[in-house]
Image: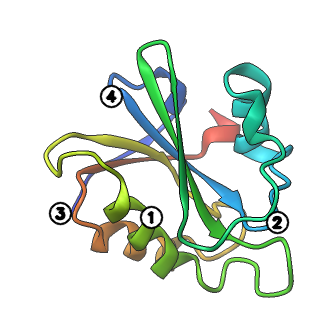
Amino acid sequence: MPIFNLKSGNVLETDWKNIAFAINIEGDNSRGFSGIIAKEYWPGIENTGKKKLGETINWKCGSKIFHALVCYSLGTDGWEKTPDAITHCLDSLDIPESEPIAIVLIGERGGREKEILGGIARSKKKVEVYWNYFNF
């Protein structure tokens, strides 16, 4: 299902209950958007230990369900495999294809936005992409 909306703003203010964001395979998620989630909603996501590319971790917090998508590395290959990993992660979520997912534009500062948007668009899920999170 294609991306149904691109939106500038705070994904945490979305009307949708599902919010997806990136975490890394190394398990150090103390910075960026994952750091905000760790500090304000889900302390356990800050240090997950090593994970495999393509894994997902889910956490219900109030009326929201956070979906951490293991889709990049802090190492030298960084965001190279993210487009395929993001497609896999989104499609593996146990969410009906018709139910919207709000997602932060993953890798927004890494210069691979177009490829990553392509990975999101290839997913079977209905996704609203929030960009420019840190500058609204």
Q: Secondary structure at mark 1?
A: helix
2 and 1 marks in contact (CB < 8 Å)? no
Q: Nearer the viewer, residue 53 or 14?
A: 53
Which label was assigned to residue 109?
Answer: none
Are the residues at dot 1 and dot 4 in contact (C-beta closer than 8 Å)? no
The earlier-in-sequence mark between 1 and 4 is 4
Q: Earlier in the sequence, mark 4 or mark 3?
A: 3
Quick one: which residue is furthest to the top in this view?
62
Please give the residue where the numbered disc 4 appears in the rendered image.
16
The number of numbered discs placed on residues in the rendered structure image is 4
**Sequence-first tag of 2 and 3:** 3
Residue that numbered label 2 is attached to: 26
- What separation in Å lies between label 2 and label 1 (alpha carbons)? 17 Å
Q: Residue 89's mark?
A: 1
52 displayed left or right of 119: right
User: Left or right: 121 with respect to 104?
Assistant: left
- Residue at which label 3 appears: 1
Q: Amino acid at mark 1?
A: Cys
At label 4, the amino acid type is Trp
